[in-house]
Image (tube, grey):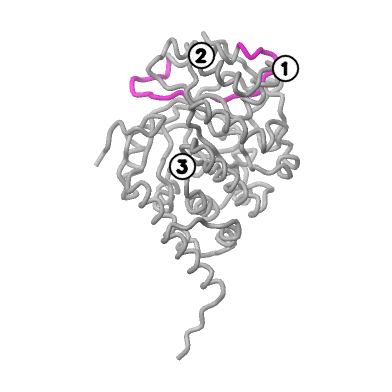
């Protein structure tokens, strides 16, 4: 009897050999994996890579998401968080108002403030600087993870300062790392189609390049599941991989599953679980020089996050307290989660929960 191996099977076997030999996957390899229906093999390979890099440890942090303003000059097609100044529900909190909010919700275990918001032209750059300065003075023990690369580009425009000057000013006020948002899909064609009227592909990368040169270790994302092609997703990862080759400044890559505009949207308007797991696994395989891939439970749910931990993810995010951006866009998941539930979630996937700080220093391991 003659065994016939198809071209598809041979191609997957070649990719498996590359992965197991530590060879870098090409753009064509990434596209092939996205077009393959062999999720189990893709997930198994991603799991092997993750176990080599991180063992069975899965990291989480106790953090709070804070939003100083939802007023925004941009009109990105996918965003339901932004408001015009005159809209019902529009707000811009003073530093004192934010501190009052934090005082009501913070507990002693919180290690990080995750701060993003709208591009509000009605307040000066100094407002954004003093906002984080006030938080750092009041809560010196909490790490300030603030602003996206798109926000840094916005601050540069309204202040007339270059990226380095903007970042140095914020660092002096207490900034310790950038968030990963604003990347969406790193394709100018996509950004035009989705009306991403904020930082371009090159500007997003240049902000992070500048931050890395100034000594910041940052985060980065990919918002998938709208109009982008498979090729654009893979090229997005390669843009990140190439900058990481240059700076080694990214700590984690975070695939973000696009949410529909309404919580009542049907299942057909949402990414499939199959696509969400593929995004995690292929990210792990393509981004060989990034230590961690995050499973963002806010967008994919807690149970799918557990499965993602066996398909390449080594980070389960954090407690958050109250997430607003994805939920404004229709997320059906919890807006926050307790520390105990995160530990249970990770153990339920057969992994070892590790509480971390913002920079992946281990605080406590739960064997």
Residue 3 within the segment the image draws in magenta: no
Residue wearing tag 2: 173
Badge 1 element: loop
Q: CA distance from mark 3 to mark 1?
A: 36 Å
Q: Earlier in the sequence, mark 3 or mark 2?
A: 2
Is there CB contact under 8 Å for labels 2 and 1? no
Residue at label 1?
A: 86
Please name the residue shown 47% across and 84% down the image.
3
Q: Which contiguous range is marked in magenta? A: 104-126
Please tell me whether mark 2 or mark 1 is closer to you in this view.
Answer: 2
Residue 251 position within the rendered picture, expressed as x and y whole percent measured from the top left: 46, 37
Q: Main secondary structure of the magenta part?
A: loop
Residue at image location 58% in from the left, 48% down from the top: 238
Would you name the residue on which mark 3 appears? 294
Dot 2 alpha-carbon crowd within 10 angstroms: few under 14, some 14 to 19, many 20 or more: many
Label 3 with label 1: CB-CB less than 8 Å: no
Question: Which of the 4 image quarters holds residue 160?
Answer: top right
Q: Count residues near mark 1 (Cα–Cα under 10 Å), then give few for <14, some for 14-19, many for 20+.
A: few
Earlier-in-chain disc, 2 versus 1: 1
Residue 127 on image: x %, y %: 60, 12
Residue at the extreme top of the image, as rendered: 96
359 left or right of 186 in image: left
């Amino acid at each position: 009897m003659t065994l016939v191996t198809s071209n598809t099977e041979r191609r997957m076997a070649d990719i498996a050999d590359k992965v197991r030999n530590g060879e870098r996957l090409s753009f064509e390899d990434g596209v092939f994996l996205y077009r393959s229906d062999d999720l189990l093999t893709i997930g198994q390979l991603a799991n092997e890579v993750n176990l080599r890099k991180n063992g069975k440890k899965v990291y989480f942090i106790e953090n709070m998401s804070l939003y100083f303003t939802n007023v925004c000059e941009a009109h990105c097609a996918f965003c339901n968080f932004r408001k015009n100044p005159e809209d019902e529900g529009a707000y811009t909190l003073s530093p004192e108002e934010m501190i009052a909010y934090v005082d009501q919700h913070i507990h002693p275990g919180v290690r990080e403030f995750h701060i993003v918001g709208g591009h509000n032209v009605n307040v000066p750059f100094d407002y954004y600087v003093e906002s984080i300065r006030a938080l750092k003075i009041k809560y010196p023990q909490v790490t300030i993870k603030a602003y996206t690369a798109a926000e840094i580009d916005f601050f540069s425009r309204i202040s007339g300062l270059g990226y380095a000057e903007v970042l140095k000013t914020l660092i002096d006020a207490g900034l310790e790392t950038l968030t990963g948002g604003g990347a969406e899909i790193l394709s100018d064609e996509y950004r035009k189609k989705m009306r991403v009227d904020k930082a371009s592909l090159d500007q997003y990368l240049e902000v992070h390049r500048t931050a890395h040169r100034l000594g910041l270790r940052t985060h980065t994302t990919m918002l998938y599941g709208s109009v982008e092609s498979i090729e654009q997703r893979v090229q997005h990862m390669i843009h990140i991989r190439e900058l990481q080759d240059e700076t080694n400044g990214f700590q984690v890559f975070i695939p973000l599953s696009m949410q529909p505009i309404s919580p009542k949207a049907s299942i057909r308007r949402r990414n499939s679980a199959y696509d969400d797991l593929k995004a995690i696994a292929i990210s792990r395989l393509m981004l060989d020089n990034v230590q961690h891939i995050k499973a963002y439970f806010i967008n994919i749910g807690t149970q799918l996050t557990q499965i993602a931990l066996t398909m390449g993810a080594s980070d389960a995010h954090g407690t958050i307290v109250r997430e607003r951006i994805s939920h404004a866009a229709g997320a059906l998941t919890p807006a926050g989660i307790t520390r105990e539930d995160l530990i249970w979630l990770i153990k339920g996937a057969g992994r070892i929960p590790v509480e971390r700080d913002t920079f992946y220093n281990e605080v406590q391991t739960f064997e």
